[in-house]
Image (cartoon, rainbow, N blue to C red):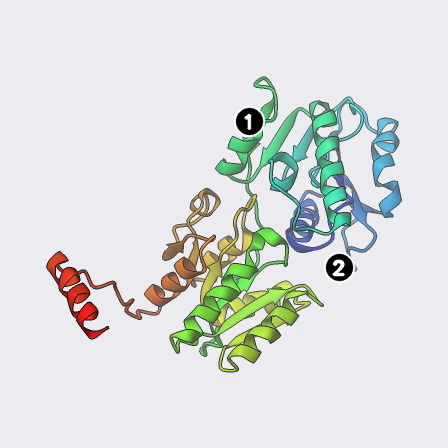
Amino acid sequence: MKIFCDASNMHVGGGKTIILDFISAAEKFPKINFVIFIDERLILKKNIKNNVEIIKVKIFWRLFISFYLRFKIVKSNCFISLGNIPPLLNLNCYSILFMGNRYIIDSISTKSFSLKTRLRINFERILFFLFKNNVNEIFVQSKSMREILEKKIKKSQKRKIFAFNNNEYNYEKFTLNSCLYDFIYVANDDPHKNHKNLLKSWLQLSKEKIYPSLCLVLPKNSFLVREIESIKKIDPAIKINIESNLNKDEVVSLLKSSKALIFPSFFESFGLPLVEAIKCKIDIIASEKDFVRDLVDPNETFDPKSPTSISRAVKRYLKIKETKTEIKDTPEFIDYLINSRLKF
């Protein structure tokens, strides 16, 4: 049997994790031959086993993979697209589309993205809706993603939840005794990751002289660096640190060196850092959203649209009492008005 896999549009973030896990898992099936198309920018380990053939693809040639496979695939083969885009042709074999990008199947505004990214997302949306019937099944990783998908495809088309992760990774190899950070957030800087409100909440906390430490794991040269510098100019005591270009070992080490994962994202198709936080045995405070509850039961939750709600969740977690509004008797209010008028 031969399995063909198109992962040619994945080389960073969660997509990178998915394809690296898939390649690692494929090596455990020596009697099955895998042909895997990857982005030429993706860096792999050196010694990949003989049953896995890697074909590196330039960006321009991605759209032609289906035409190449049309002449290579036979009915006894299997095809899976890991990169959210169905094949442009019916490949005449059992085929699966793995959907890991909510932007493609949901009616979410892309106005916060650059023009280049907006064009790419809308192009991928068109490809999905034009060619989604070229696969036998569509896999997603959570209940909330399946509910969205069910509104976009025919009732007769199969869809299945199949969340997977590399369970062989040894999270126990990091036994750190010291705590470097109160909170950590592992995410790229896309708008839906909601760093904007997270940073506002840290500024609010500083006005109350509360300074929890926060580590942000971000892409290199993120625009958020400048925003954090601006916040620190307002109050130099604010504790926000940035880490970039980390491998999995380094990310896990930072997670285990933190008290809790804070996860203010507006939406996710899966939310891998939530899973990794559980495996690292650290606490979680997160958005009160369906995608979070699909995977974990957080220690604290908040409204991700509200910096105040985020800051209050942080205080609850740190066991810092919130000052409540004092409710007085109505005659006291009238008495105040009278006395104020006399003093005027």
Circle nearer the N terminus (2, 1): 2
Q: Residue at x 50, y 77 (%)?
A: 239
Residue sitting nearer the eye, 208 or 331: 331
224 to the left or right of 68 = left
Measured from the top left, where is residue 52 in percent x and y?
77, 45
Q: Is residue 318 above or below residue 77?
A: below
Say which residue label 2 marks: 45
Q: Amino acid at mark 1?
A: Glu
Q: Is residue 128 above or below residue 11?
A: above
**Residue 333 quadrant:** bottom left
Q: Residue at x 65, y 53 (%)?
A: 17
Say which residue label 1 marks: 150
**Residue 77 quadrant:** top right
Q: Is residue 94 visible?
A: no
**Residue 248 quadrant:** bottom right
Residue sitting nearer the eye, 113 or 19: 113
The nearer-to-camera label among 2 and 1 is 1
52 to the left or right of 281 = right
Residue sitting nearer the eye, 334 or 341: 341
Measured from the top left, where is residue 199 in percent x and y?
52, 66
Q: Is residue 261 visible?
A: yes
Q: Residue at x 47, y 74 (%)?
A: 213
Q: Is residue 65 above or below residue 339?
A: above
Image quadrant occupied by the N terminus? top right
Q: Amino acid at mark 2?
A: Lys
13 to the left or right of 258 = right
Image quadrant occupied by the C terminus? bottom left
- Within 10 Å of disc 1 (Cα), the crowding (few <14, some 14-19, many 20+) is some
